[in-house]
Amino acid sequence: QKEVEQNSGPLSVPEGAIASLNCTYSDRGSQSFFWYRQYSGKSPELIMFIYSNGDKEDGRFTAQLNKASQYVSLLIRDSQPSDSATYLCAGGGYSGGGADGLTFGKGTHLIIQP
Amino acid sequence: KAGVTQTPRYLIKTRGQQVTLSCSPISGHRSVSWYQQTPGQGLQFLFEYFSETQRNKGNFPGRFSGRQFSNSRSEMNVSTLELGDSALYLCASSLGLAEGYYQETQYFGPGTRLLVL
């Protein structure tokens, strides 16, 4: 059974600091990884995706993937109060007939303290 | 470009009834996936439709079904509702290129919040 594990938090980070969010996955067949941000009462909003080992940067966000360790992380630099949300890690792959559905972790609740 | 739209946004039903939810994908997107989100189980994959065919299915009972129309719009139906079906139902669309090694990026709609009494 495919699983994605995240620490539920809450993770409390001072404003302006770096927030580090982590997840691990069980399925070695997963090739694509996504980070979504979800505000309370809203739907998930895509932050970043990563397919290759290493780092991928987009503005204040950096995603890191280590397939050997089955580990994905998201770094948020210069954290802002508006970054306070639940961050969902998801993995996905392809198996013959079509895209597998994304397997989501249960999310990490991030709180940025002003 | 307009995003994914879902209707209705809120729904209250009683046990035993059935419900149909609707999703219109981003223009040009041909794949529609449905997810259920509950506080206990998180986000779980229900099924994916591409070109009017169900391509993949998650681990949900047969009471959950769906379909896709030629314009890529999709509907999801839940029959014989149970209290545990209360959840946020999310639709996500992607290009649906059908070939490839990597999962495509999926964009979520606002969801339909279903309450079963």
Image (cartoon, coloured by chain):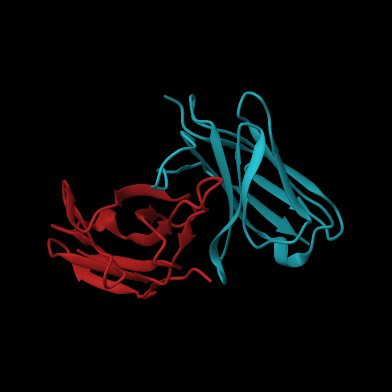
| Hue used for the chain lettered B | cyan
Give coordinates of residue B3: x percent, y percent. Answer: 46, 32
**Residue A61 appears left or right of B67:** left
Could you tell me which residue is drawn at 42 percent across and 72 percent down?
A26
* B10 with respect to A107 (left or right): right
- Taking the spot 65% from the left edge, 35% from the top edge, the residue there is B74
Task: State the image coordinates of residue A93 (x, y, percent, origin top left).
Answer: 44, 54
Depth check: give the residue in front, A56 or A70: A70
Taking the view exactly as shown, the residue that stands out farthest to the front is A96
Q: Is residue A70 left or right of residue B116?
A: left
Rendering coords of residue B73 (x, y %): 63, 30
Q: How many labels does the image show?
A: 0
The image shows residue A91, relative to residue A58, as above or below, that is below
Viewer-side residue, B108 vs A63: A63
Task: Using the rendered image of the protein, determine whether residue B8 is visible from the camera's viewpoint.
Answer: no
Q: Quadrant of the N terminus of chain B?
A: top left
Q: The red chain is which one?
A: A
Quadrant (top left/top right/bottom left/bottom right) for the C terminus of chain B: bottom right
Q: In which quadrant of the rendered view does residue A53 lie? A: bottom left
Farthest residue toward the right?
B16
At a point 80% along the width and 58% down the height, the residue shown is: B81
Residue B21 as seen in the image, left or right of residue B24: right
Decide if residue B61 is in sight here.
yes
Residue B85 placed where, x, y %? 71, 61
Q: Is residue B100 above or below residue B59?
A: above
Q: Residue at x 48, y 55 (%)?
A: A102
The answer to which of B66 and A18 lies nearer the viewer is B66
- Nearest the viewer among A63 and A113 is A63
